[in-house]
Amino acid sequence: MKNIILLAIGIIVLSSCKQEGDFNLNFKGLFKDDALVLNQAYELDDISVKFENLGFLLTDISIVNDDNESVELADAEFVALNGVDQAGAEAGQVLSYNNIPTGTYTKLKFTIGVPEDLNATVPGDYAITDPLGRSDYYWEAWGSYIFSKTEGNADVSGDGVYDLKFFYHTGSDALKRSFELDREIVIDKNSTSTLELFLDYNELLRNADGTAFDIEASPRNHDPNKLEIVTQLVDNYARAIKVRS
């Protein structure tokens, strides 16, 4: 009995000494320097746009320390930037991860999109609560998950009527993009560290020369043989993603 008690005490002591903390990733939408509010007007060069549906799939999320050791945070997550008022837009969406080993990490890694092996699966392979179980983020005709949705309405004539529906959906293996963001992340015992990631849609909807997409000429994409505009969109992630801690 004495040995059992001592063993139990030892387990409790070891558990209490475990060095772990929590980590939050806080995603927010931006338009230039402003929090992006759905159905609010924003000027994209010569036209006015209102966004109504913004979301994307993240995969292979991890943080890396100085010894190049990775802590895997999640295989897949779904992010919806659906703030319908200023408070909601400024709050964004928080992804929370618990029991992270304490220490200093120097890099955040993630992919916007789905890797080839998972992209060969279908939503029916997963629980409906799983990020990859979302049937609204799957293109059956393309045999691919929809990696991101950027949808809204545009006023191209300047009459105050937002009557041109635009949507840019990305998908297929060629359109996933992976990122390694250098940023110090300190995980302390029994505390929560937060990293804010902003996606600037003013930067996202631009051509390589910096001019805005011609939404009037190309308001949508659903042709797997015409990927130019959505290829530019996913290439723009590199300048549209902004980090604050």
Image: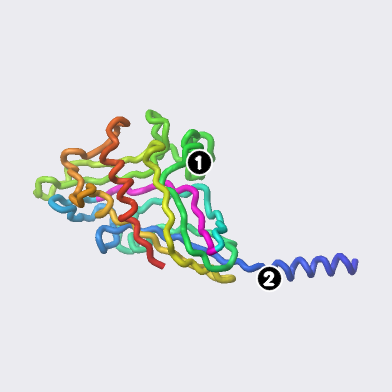
Residue stretch in magenta: 51-66
- Asked whether residue 120 is in view, the answer is yes
Could you tell me which residue is drawn at 50 percent across and 34 percent down? 121
Q: Report if residue 63 lies within the magenta region.
A: yes
* Position of the C terminus by quadrant: bottom left
Q: Amino acid at mark 1?
A: Ile
Q: Amino acid at mark 2?
A: Cys
**Residue furthest front as drawn:** 67
How was the colour assigned to the protein in this rendering? rainbow
Residue 242, given in percent of the width and then of the height, sits at: 34, 60
Q: Secondary structure at mark 2?
A: loop
Residue 207 x %, y %: 22, 47
Disc sitting over residue 17 in the figure: 2
Q: Nearer the viewer, residue 206 or 97?
A: 206
Q: Which mark is residue 128?
A: 1
Tell which residue pokes out farthest to the top in this image. Answer: 141
Which-is-in-front pick, marks 2 and 1?
Answer: 2
123 in relation to 186, above or below:
above
Taking the spot 42% from the left edge, 46% from the top edge, the residue there is 57
- Which mark, by number, is residue 144? none
The CA span between labels 2 and 1 is 37 Å
| Residue 245 within the magenta-colored segment of the rendering | no
Q: Is residue 52 left or right of residue 129?
A: left
